[in-house]
């Protein structure tokens, strides 16, 4: 057994190693087991004093001094890097007889640069080439106040909105929209665009193809009448200035009625053509080049596309078939008319719903052409589906996940057809394909005039405190309810929509 004196000597050696690390005047007392007490003082010496209780500051100073002393005795420990620590851990595992862990190299992630969308992009519902798009949130007071300062048309928001749809625009019926134009933008809007916006607001032009075609033809007139500043002489100058001239006109059209996805794709295509004008063209040559491009786009993407779709759709209609259509679609109507001209014997059931009742016009046109038709309302759908052979629908847009945006009620028709095992065919041009993905029709939609839903019992609905009317324009049909999509490229399953967007992106969206 070692003697207490040896323990005392070991403690004294430790104090010697500490050296001058202790603060001056600090005394340390050691007691051995034999009861003899000896004290060694460190620092500036002095008479032996009984140990006194240390303050918090003194205890902290003592602790720091001990840490510094331990570092001086064993050498300062160098901070290891991550690679050195990994290597040290591997050596320790080898010493224990374990296999070192496999280290995966971290993937290099490209930096993400966030850019704030401009007001025009927000109003158009698109933030760049093929982007998913950002829409103005009408339930955000700050965003609305900022947007109204730059809008070409100031409209009165509906006060009684359904809470779930407050982020969507909904306006009161104006006595005169032209009187709501802001003075500073009055001269920036071409008369053709001004008339077109009024027709959009009053629903005088309906249907995705008709609205897109009318908009592009109005922009063609804008380009033809365009007069650049005096110092603009080449196509490069036109490219920079003309894009700015179109912005207030696009803002005006959006304020009159929100643009459809197909119209947004057409605007992005037009801006791309303006941005890539050959710089060596003269002013007249540049204007002629743009108007020719617009005419080509209308012919290829709408006129010729509908002709090809009608041929594919007519081939799906056989003798004795019963074809069911909903509301009105130009592509579906063209397919039925073509099948009738080719001598196919079939009959059509047209399903319609309030408030637009677009199916009435379709039945009148089909009956005038000699097609056997039956007209029913949506609530009678289940009674006729047992006799239906094929369902032919139109579309406002088809999303990247295969979902279809179309007139409200389309999802109900597709769901009922699925229950009766009736194939559902959707006729849609590829310029309406979108890279967006939606799971419901709440986030993005269009709200119609609530007064269109009025009945005699609801005539005073604005005076009832908690009553609100919701007039949705579109709904979303999931891809699993769609059997086939008929386009100008041929017959496609809904799952092939992203393939078309990827392979034909320049032709479809640019």
Image (tube, helix red, strand yellow):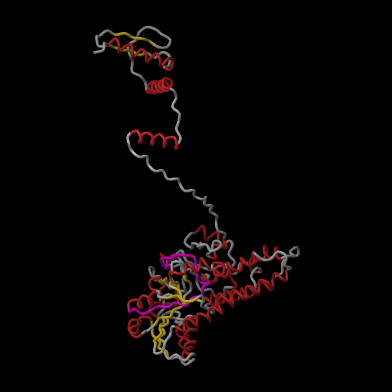
Residue 82 at x, y = what percent? Answer: 44, 37
Stretch in magenta: 420-443
* In the rendered image, the vertical position of residue 483 relative to residue 56, given as above or below: below
Determine the main secondary structure of the stretch shown in magenta: loop
Residue 211 at x, y = what percent? Answer: 55, 76
Of 304 and 181, nearer the camera is 304
Q: Do we see residue 472 in this rendering?
A: no
Instruction: Find out whether residue 429 is within the magenta segment.
Output: yes
Viewport quadrant of the N terminus: top left
Residue 465 at x, y = what percent? Answer: 39, 68
Q: Quadrant of residue 194?
A: bottom right
Q: Do we see residue 282 in this rendering?
A: yes
For residue 461, side relative to residue 110 (left or right): left
Q: How many labels does the image show?
A: 0
* In the rendered image, the vertical position of residue 338 relative to residue 23, given as above or below: below
Residue ID at (53%, 53%) = 114
């Amino acid at each position: 057994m070692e003697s207490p004196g040896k323990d005392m000597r070991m403690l004294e050696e430790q104090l010697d190693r500490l050296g001058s690390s202790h603060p001056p005047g600090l005394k340390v007392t050691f007691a051995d087991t034999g009861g003899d007490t000896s004290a060694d003082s460190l620092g500036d010496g002095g008479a032996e004093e009984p140990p006194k209780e240390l303050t918090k500051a003194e205890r902290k100073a003592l602790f720091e001094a001990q840490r510094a002393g331990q570092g001086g005795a064993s050498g300062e420990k160098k901070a290891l890097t991550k690679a050195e620590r990994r290597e040290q851990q591997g050596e320790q595992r080898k010493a224990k007889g374990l296999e070192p862990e496999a280290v995966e190299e971290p993937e290099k992630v490209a930096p993400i640069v966030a850019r704030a969308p401009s007001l025009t992009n927000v109003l158009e519902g698109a933030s760049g080439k093929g982007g998913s798009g950002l829409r103005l949130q009408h339930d955000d007071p700050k965003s609305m106040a900022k947007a109204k300062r730059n809008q070409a048309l100031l409209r009165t928001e509906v006060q009684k909105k359904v809470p779930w749809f407050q982020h969507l625009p909904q306006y009161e019926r104006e006595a005169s929209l032209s009187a709501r134009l802001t003075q500073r933008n009055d001269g920036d809007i071409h008369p053709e665009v001004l008339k077109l916006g009024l027709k959009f607001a009053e629903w005088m032009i309906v249907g995705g193809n008709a609205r897109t075609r009318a908009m592009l033809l109005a922009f063609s007139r804008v380009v033809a009448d365009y007069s650049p500043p005096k110092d603009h002489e080449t196509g490069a100058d036109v490219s920079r200035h003309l894009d700015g001239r179109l912005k207030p006109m696009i803002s005006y059209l959006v304020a009159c009625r929100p643009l459809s996805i197909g119209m947004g794709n057409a605007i992005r295509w037009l801006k791309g053509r303006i941005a890539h004008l050959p710089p060596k063209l003269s002013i007249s040559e540049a204007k002629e080049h743009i108007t020719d491009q617009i005419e080509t786009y209308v012919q290829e993407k709408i006129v010729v596309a509908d002709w090809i779709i009608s041929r594919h759709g007519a081939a799906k209609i056989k003798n004795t078939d019963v074809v069911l259509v909903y509301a009105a679609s130009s592509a579906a109507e063209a397919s039925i008319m073509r099948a009738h001209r080719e001598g196919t014997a079939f009959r059509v059931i047209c399903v319609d719903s309030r408030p637009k009742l677009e199916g009435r016009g379709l039945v009148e046109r089909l009956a005038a052409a000699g097609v056997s038709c039956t007209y029913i309302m949506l609530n009678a759908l289940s009674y006729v589906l047992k006799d239906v052979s094929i369902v032919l629908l139109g579309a406002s847009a088809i999303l990247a996940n295969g979902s279809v945006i179309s007139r409200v009620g389309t999802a109900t028709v597709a769901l009922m057809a699925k229950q009766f095992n009736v194939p559902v065919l959707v006729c849609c041009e590829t310029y309406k394909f979108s890279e967006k993905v939606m799971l419901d029709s709440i986030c993005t939609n269009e709200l119609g005039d609530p007064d269109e839903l009025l009945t005699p019992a609801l005539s005073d609905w604005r005076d009832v405190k908690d009553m609100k009317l919701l007039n949705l324009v579109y709904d979303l049909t999931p891809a699993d309810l769609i059997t086939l999509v008929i386009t100008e490229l041929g017959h496609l399953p809904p799952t092939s929509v992203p393939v078309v967007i990827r392979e034909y992106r320049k032709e479809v969206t640019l």
